Image (cartoon, rainbow, N blue to C red):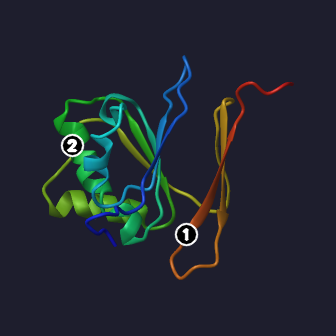
């Protein structure tokens, strides 16, 4: 729960590479947009991948961030990866609020196993024992590896 001195979950990783976008946001709790304004990064200007868990603590900031990205004129595609229910959550929030995105939005509901391997980074999800459908995400940076 957010307080005056603490925000909810959001982790922005800068994994820039000359050939691929590198800003990845893991979770997007309420207030994430405001906190991102205090960084040197502008996540609205890049193509990003989001990984979400379905709890309110880590997803209530997502609809607003998606809308702000559209209002900023961003047209680069965005992919959201998350557990079962993330598609319904995003689509329902956008529909009920009368909002939309002006960029291609792909929502991928994931299970356990490999999510992404782009040759530079490998992302794998592992289920956790929790009352929510929560996944642990392991990100392996493949850059600078000896083959």
> Label 2's element?
helix
Expressed as whole percent of the image width and height from the top left, the position of residue 67 reads 22, 46
Residue reaching furthest bottom?
131
> Front-most of 10 and 101?
10
* Quarter of the rendering containing residue 8: bottom left
Crowding around mark 1 (Cα neighbors within 10 Å: few <14, some 14 to 19, many 20+) is many
Compared to 75, does 55 lie above or below? below
Expressed as whole percent of the image width and height from the top left, the position of residue 108 reads 49, 52
Query: What distance separates the C-alpha of mark 1 from that of mark 2?
Result: 26 Å
> Front-most of 33 and 72?
33
Expressed as whole percent of the image width and height from the top left, the position of residue 25 reads 45, 46
Residue reaching furthest left?
98
* Side of 144 relative to 106 (left or right): right
Q: Earlier in the sequence, mark 1 or mark 2?
A: 2
* Side of 11 relative to 64 (left or right): right
Q: Which residue lies at the image location 66% right of the left edge and 30% below the top edge?
A: 120
| Quadrant occupied by the C terminus | top right
> Front-most of 9 and 115?
9
Compared to 141, does 9 lie above or below? below
Residue reaching furthest front?
5
Compared to 77, does 59 lie above or below? below
Crowding around mark 2 (Cα neighbors within 10 Å: few <14, some 14 to 19, many 20+) is some
Q: Which residue lies at the image location 25% right of the left edge and 39% below the top edge?
A: 69
Compared to 129, does 3 lie above or below? above
Q: Which residue is mark 2?
A: 68
* Side of 71 relative to 41 (left or right): left
| Quadrant occupied by the N terminus | bottom left
Q: Which mark is residue 29?
A: none
Q: Which residue lies at the image location 58% right of the left edge and 79% below the top edge?
A: 130
Q: Which residue is mark 1?
A: 134
Q: Which residue lies at the image location 22% right of the left edge and 57% below the top edge?
A: 94
């Amino acid at each position: 729960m957010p307080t005056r001195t603490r925000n909810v979950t959001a982790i922005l990783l800068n994994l820039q590479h000359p050939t691929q976008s590198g800003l990845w946001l893991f979770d997007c709790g309420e207030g994430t947009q405001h906190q991102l304004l205090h960084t040197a990064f502008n996540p609205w200007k890049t193509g990003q991948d989001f990984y979400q868990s379905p709890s309110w603590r880590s997803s209530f900031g997502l609809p607003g961030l998606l809308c702000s990205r559209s209002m900023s004129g961003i047209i680069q595609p965005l992919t959201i990866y998350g557990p079962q229910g993330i598609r319904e959550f995003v689509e329902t929030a956008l529909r009920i609020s009368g909002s939309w995105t002006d960029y291609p939005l792909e929502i991928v509901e994931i299970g356990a196993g490999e999510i992404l391997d782009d040759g530079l980074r490998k992302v794998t999800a592992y289920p956790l024992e929790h009352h929510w459908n929560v996944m642990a995400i392991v990100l392996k940076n493949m850059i600078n590896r000896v083959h």
